[in-house]
Image: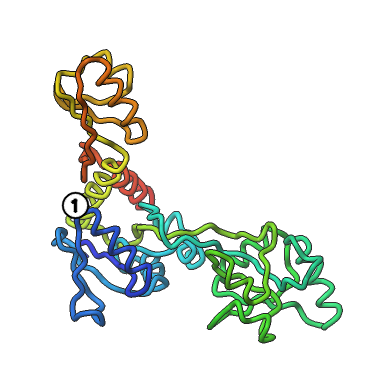
Amino acid sequence: MTRLTIAIPSKGRLKDNAEAWFSKAGFTLKQAGGERGYTAELKGLPEADVLLLSAREIAQGLIDGAFHIGVTGEDLLNDLSADLPRDASVIKQLGFGGADVVVAVPAAWLDVNTMSDLEAAGARFRQRHGRRMKVATKYLRLTRNYFAAKSVGEYRLVESAGATEAAPSSGQAEVIVDITSSGATLKANSLKVLDDGVILKSQAALTGSLKADWSQEALGALEKLLSSVEAVESADATRMLVAANPISDSVIKAEGMTPVSATSVLSPSYAAVKNARAIAESGAGPVTILRTDFIFDQETPSFKKFVTNLKSVA
C-alpha cells in the first residue's frame, strides 16, 4: 500500500456524518457506481483511495493492517483488539455516533442493581436451575474483561446474532451487554442498566492502523488531510476582529489576542465580543467580528502524535 487507503462506513447515519465531517474539511466524497458502489474518492485528496465498508469490517481491518485509516466506533475497536495500543491509534474523536456499551438486566429484577448484585443473582440462578445464567452480546471481549474486573463469574456468554435487547424476553439469555444511545430500546424491552454497568462510552473516531504498511506517500496524504481538519477546528474556535484604526499593543497583550496586522487580530471565539469591545473602547473602533473557514498552522499536532505512536510499535 503506497497510497493512503481510507475506510468509511458504507451506509446509515455513520456514513452521512462521516461524509459531512470530511466535507467540512474540504474533501467531498464521490461514490463510484452510485449508491451501491463500495469504492469512492475524496475530491481534494487525490492521493487517497476510499473503501466503503461496515463499521465492524473497518475496525477489524484497522486492527489487521488492511488499510491505513478509517471511521468506526471505539466500541468495536476495543472489543475486536486484544492489544489496541499496538494495533491502532485514535487520531480524532468525531463527536457523533455516541453510545454506551452497558450491562442490562430485566427491570423486574428489583434486587439486582449492581455488578455485585448480578454475581449473587448468578449464584442463586445456578443453584435453582442447575446452569449458569446466560449473557447475550456481540461484545465478547469487552464483556469478559469487564465481568472479570468486577469479579463476576457466574455466567455463560452467548454470542448474539440479531437484536440483543430481545434475548431476555425470547428466553435466549437472562442478561445482555449491548450498545445504547438513549436507553429507549432497553426500556421498551423492560430492561434496566446496572448502576455500575457502563462498560465503555463510545463514539465514532478517525483511527489509524499501526499494523498497516505506511509509505511516505501515505503519511504525506494523511498530514494533508489532518492539517485541513485542524485548520477547520482552529477556525471554529477563533474569530477575526478587524478595526478601523490600528490596535494598540497594550490592548492586544492585555486581552490575550494574536495580531494579524496593524488593524486585525485573532481572538478565541468565546471572548470575541469582549475583546471587540475593548478594542473599540481603546479608540481603534469600529470593530467587526468575522468568522473564518480555515486557519492553518505550521504544525499538525494530531499527525505528529500519530507518527510518534507509529514509531513506538515499529
**In the image, residue 306 lies at what x, y percent?**
33, 49
Image vertical order of residue 217 relative to residue 39, above or below: above
**Residue 292 occupies quadrant:** top left
Which of the two residues, 230 or 48, is positioned nearer the viewer here? 230
The residue under the point 76% across, 78% down is: 132
- Colour setting: rainbow
The residue under the point 23% across, 40% down is: 291
The residue under the point 62% across, 79% down is: 158
Q: Quadrant of the N terminus?
A: bottom left
**In the shown orientation, is residue 121 left or right of residue 181?**
right
**In the image, residue 163 lies at what x, y percent?**
55, 80
Q: Is residue 2 visible?
A: no
The residue under the point 73% across, 64% down is: 152
Q: Is residue 111 visible?
A: yes
Provide the secondary structure element on which disc 1 rests. Answer: helix
Image vertical order of residue 104 relative to residue 91, above or below: below
**In the image, residue 285 lies at what x, y percent?**
20, 22
Q: Amino acid at mark 1?
A: Gly
Image vertical order of residue 160 relative to residue 123, above or below: below
Q: Which residue is mark 1?
A: 220
**Residue 247 occupies quadrant:** top left
**Residue 297 occupies quadrant:** top left
Which of the two residues, 222 or 250, is positioned nearer the viewer here? 250
Q: How many marks?
A: 1
